[in-house]
Amino acid sequence: MKIRLSAVCLALLACSACGPESQGERANAATCEAGKVHLIGEVEGRAIDESHDVSGFYFVQVGEVALDMTFGETGHLRLEWETLVADGDEVDVSKGELVMPGSTDTLMAEEGSSLIPTGDAYQFRLYWPDGSSLDGCYAQAEF
């Protein structure tokens, strides 16, 4: 009985390390809110946790494959990828550009950045050259 219980405990401990966290992945920290983009993480060494109204948005997979969004007074996000992405699937971003509101600097995302479209919501993670990252989520407003 003691040996069987020990084996079960060892199996549970081993499986507790099995999931995305053990593979270097983590859940997207940004929450989705209709008509807003939520950004949380780090940009140029500065901690970010802010939401902005989205004034322009498109997601297209005909001809080009891209997501383009304007938010806040001067914020802009553009993500591009190489292949069509299905709803709920993750795709690697081949080009990611971000201009934070109030800035004129265009930040270029690094390899490993990704996008997950899920219905009317879009989650993304951008990695920066210094190793930090920024999570984001946008949910389309209902008309």
Image (cartoon, rainbow, N blue to C red):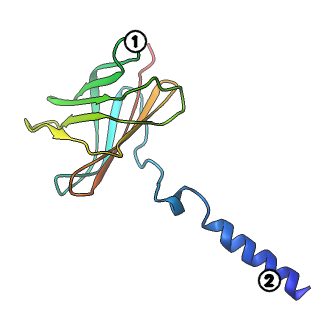
Q: Position of residue 43 (x, y in %)?
A: 21, 50
Q: CA distance from mark 2 to mark 1?
A: 56 Å
Which type of secondary structure does the marked residue at label 1 adopt? loop
Please state which amino acid type lies under the numbered disc 2.
Ser
Q: Position of residue 88 (x, y in %)?
A: 54, 32
Please state which amino acid type lies under the numbered disc 1.
Val
Q: Residues within 10 Å of mark 2 (few under 14, many from 20)?
A: few
**Residue that label 1 marks:** 62
The quadrant in which residue 109 appears is top left
Given contact means CB atoms under 8 Å apart, are the residues at marks 2 and 1 in contact?
Answer: no
**Residue that label 2 marks:** 6
Q: Which residue: 27% across, 57% down?
A: 131
Q: Residue furthest right?
A: 1
Q: Is residue 72 visible?
A: no
Q: Residue furthest bottom?
A: 2
Vertical position of residue 133 compared to residue 84: above or below? below
Vertical position of residue 117 compared to residue 13: above or below? above
Q: Residue furthest front?
A: 82
Q: Residues within 10 Å of mark 1 (few under 14, many from 20)?
A: few
Vertical position of residue 13 compared to residue 42: above or below? below
Q: Nearer the viewer, residue 19 or 34?
A: 19
Q: Which residue: 18% across, 57% down?
A: 45
* Quadrant occupied by the C terminus: top left
Q: Which residue: 45% across, 18% down?
A: 142
Q: Which residue: 87% across, 88% down?
A: 2
Q: Is residue 19 visible?
A: yes
The quadrant in which residue 140 appears is top left
Vertical position of residue 90 compared to residue 62: above or below? below
